[in-house]
Image (spheres, rainbow, N blue to C red):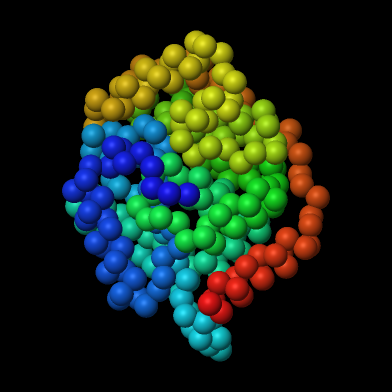
Amino acid sequence: MTPVLDTAIAPEIRRDVEARLLRIEANNDVRLLMAVQSGSRAWGFPSPDSDYDVRFVYARRRDWYLSLTAGRDVIETPIEDKIDLDGWDVRKALGLLLKSNAVVSEWIESPIRYRVDDPVVAKLARLADELLDPRALAHHYPNLGRNTADRWLDGPGDVPVKKYFYALRPALAIRALRTDARTRPPMNLQALIVACDLPTGIVEQIGMLVEAKARTNERASGTRLPDLDALIRAELAAVADLPAAIPRPELAERANSLFLDLVNT
């Protein structure tokens, strides 16, 4: 994938992020394979004061992986000027991908990219498609959504707009998988809505929420929407309806070969 939706990130922010990524590569002696936007800006419902959640996958030199003592497989940096950069080693990413990890899948699908992807990312995407286990992938989402729903969607009173989305997006990801269990859910909310085949009234309510969040800060509240509440509850409870994939051991071998080819070049 190549960088898209350039207008979603202000040019000065993009330049700042790109400079920080270069420093991360130099200071850690790593090669970035992809660098993408995560969080609400990539999900399609940012607030004016949303952070820039930048996520990346990197590879180290071959000899680093041959040490008797396993090194740390993440790189984390302090949040500065609302820019939050964190990354995973490619071996960690591949291991999680073999478990149909939703986070890795979403990074691969991010619509906002800060670098031209290394060619290996296309191979990761194909492997993720072949590894797709709808039920395993969906299990990531109920915990995300229920924590928010249990706290904010039960009982009377207004709901923080941000919290609505933190329950709604996981629910829609499950619905997308129930609609088409052969395809990983889109990361972006607007694409997710299309994949879910939602009633017009629900789409309009979600659109109102997106507009409200775009105008207000992260803590603003909005009126409760009973139809959305019901949709969220129903989808978060529907994971068991999804089929489980039949294990394919040869895909683990493919992942291992992909890793070895990468670190040996």
Q: Is residue 83 visible?
A: yes
Q: Is residue 134 left or right of residue 67?
A: right
Q: Position of residue 41 (x, y in %)?
A: 35, 39
State the residue in front, 175 or 12: 12
Q: Residue furthest bottom?
A: 68
Quadrant of the image occupied by residue 194? top right
Residue in the picture at 22% in, 45% down = 11
Quadrant of the image occupied by residue 78? bottom left
Q: Position of residue 133 (x, y in %)?
A: 70, 47
Quadrant of the image occupied by residue 213? top left
Is the residue 188 above or below the residue 157 in the image? below
Is the residue 85 above or below the residue 69 in the image? above
Q: Is residue 59 left or right of residue 239?
A: left
Q: Position of residue 154 (x, y in %)?
A: 48, 25
Residue in the picture at 36% in, 24% down = 210
State the residue in front, 42 or 4: 4
Count up the numbered dots: 0
Residue in the picture at 24% in, 61% down = 19
Q: Position of residue 226 (x, y in %)?
A: 49, 15
Residue in the picture at 39% in, 33% down = 44
Q: Is residue 70 visible?
A: no
